[in-house]
């Protein structure tokens, strides 16, 4: 699987190519596009549901794409809504490099606040909320969980972190290799530079790069998964270790032979199906 080679000069082109290659959804759920108010103006979000039963648990879903790509019109958000019969709110946060941190994070935090505030109108149970995403989306989820802890501290049942992009330094054993499939070291460093609008190193905000957080106490329980062939493997394992050391319940799953995003690129593979069953079970258990 060839890696993405993303630069400031070709981001728009890659977005266009990826948009043109999107396939129709294979999941039957209802979808509604809504507008969410934020301090910088409204952002769009998609609400996915399997049924209209009242008082549903809900997930704030943050799509992946290296903080540069992707859309809230997200297949995995649909899968979660369908498999668990719950409400999934997928937010169309602002993307770098046009909108570097903290724009996207603030959009996601505002959407969480909106979900809590509008829970009755949305038909969701504000006591059964989770936050999650994949790759950069789960990296942003980890940052927003920290942001939430330090602000309103809304009760969250789970951080659902699928191979999260959380460390701008990649200073680990798995991070030192340059040629990982799909998402390699060079592209990742360029993505971080665009998202952070520079290279702050250890001084990066923990709300942008959760690995930079010095204090992980008081965070919601977490589920973290990553493939053994992922650039992010060791930084994700270390984040899980630090959460546990801080007294935060954390489930860690490492899937052998899996490269970054491989579960969505080859969804029929046995390891991809195991990954999906694993995170769905964790989310279901957390939202009971």
Image (cartoon, grey):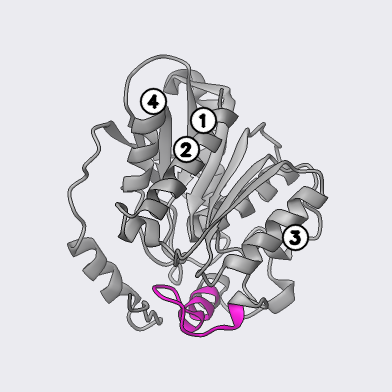
Q: Earlier in the sequence, mark 3 or mark 1?
A: 3
Q: Secondary structure at mark 2?
A: helix
Instruction: Give the CA separation, mark 4 to mark 3.
Output: 34 Å
Residue wearing tag 3: 213
- Between 110 and 254, the residue placed more toward the observer is 254
Instruction: Give the CA separation, mark 1 to mark 2.
Output: 6 Å
Residue wearing tag 2: 280
- Observer-side mark, 1 or 4, equals 1
Q: Residue 284 shows which numbered tag? A: 1
Instruction: Give the CA separation, mark 3 to mark 1.
Output: 28 Å
Q: Earlier in the sequence, mark 1 or mark 4?
A: 4
Q: Write down the region rendered in magenta.
A: 175-192
Task: Confirm whether residue 42 shows in the render.
Answer: no
Assess disc 2: are there few (<14), some (14-19) or many (≥20) residues with their C-alpha within 10 Å of its C-alpha. Answer: some
- Between 45 and 187, the residue placed more toward the observer is 187
Q: Residue 85 shows which numbered tag? A: 4
Write the residue at 66% across / 61% down: 237
Q: Is residue 50 above or below residue 74?
A: above
Assess disc 3: are there few (<14), some (14-19) or many (≥20) residues with their C-alpha within 10 Å of its C-alpha. Answer: some
Q: Earlier in the sequence, mark 4 or mark 3?
A: 4
- Between 159 and 36, the residue placed more toward the observer is 159
Residue contact between numbered discs 3 and 1, judged by CB atoms under 8 Å: no
Residue contact between numbered discs 1 and 2, judged by CB atoms under 8 Å: yes
Instruction: Give the CA separation, mark 1 to mark 4.
Output: 10 Å
Q: Secondary structure at mark 3?
A: loop
Location of residue 28 (image quadrant): top left
Assess disc 1: are there few (<14), some (14-19) or many (≥20) residues with their C-alpha within 10 Å of its C-alpha. Answer: some
Write the residue at 41% across / 63% down: 65
Q: Secondary structure at mark 4?
A: loop
Q: Residue 229 shows which numbered tag? A: none
Write the residue at 45% across / 63% down: 258
């Amino acid at each position: 699987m060839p890696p993405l080679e993303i630069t400031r000069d070709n981001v728009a082109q890659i977005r266009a190519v990826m948009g043109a290659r999107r396939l129709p959804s294979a999941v039957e759920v209802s979808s509604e596009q809504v507008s969410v108010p934020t301090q910088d103006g409204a952002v769009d979000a998609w609400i996915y549901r399997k049924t209209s039963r009242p008082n549903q648990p809900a997930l704030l879903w943050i799509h992946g794409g290296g903080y540069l790509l992707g859309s809230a019109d997200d297949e995995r958000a649909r899968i979660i809504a369908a498999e668990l019969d719950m409400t999934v709110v997928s937010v169309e946060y602002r993307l770098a490099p046009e909108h570097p941190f903290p724009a996207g994070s603030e959009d996601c935090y505002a959407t969480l606040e909106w979900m809590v505030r509008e829970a009755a109108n949305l038909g969701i149970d504000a006591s059964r909320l989770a936050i999650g995403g994949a790759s950069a989306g789960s990296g942003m989820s980890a940052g927003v969980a920290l942001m939430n802890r330090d602000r309103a501290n809304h009760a969250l049942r789970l951080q659902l972190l699928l191979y999260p992009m959380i460390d701008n330094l990649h200073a680990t054993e798995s991070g030192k290799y340059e040629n990982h499939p799909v998402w390699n070291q060079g592209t990742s460093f360029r993505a971080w530079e665009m998202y952070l609008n520079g290279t702050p190193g250890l001084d990066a905000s923990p709300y942008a790069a959760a690995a930079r957080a010095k204090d992980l106490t008081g965070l919601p329980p977490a589920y973290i998964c990553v493939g053994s062939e992922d650039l992010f493997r060791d930084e994700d394992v270390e984040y899980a270790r630090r959460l546990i050391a801080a007294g935060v319940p954390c489930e860690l799953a490492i899937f052998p032979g899996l490269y970054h995003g491989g579960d969505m690129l080859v969804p029929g593979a046995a390891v991809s199906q195991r990954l999906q069953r694993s995170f769905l079970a964790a989310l279901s258990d957390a939202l009971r």
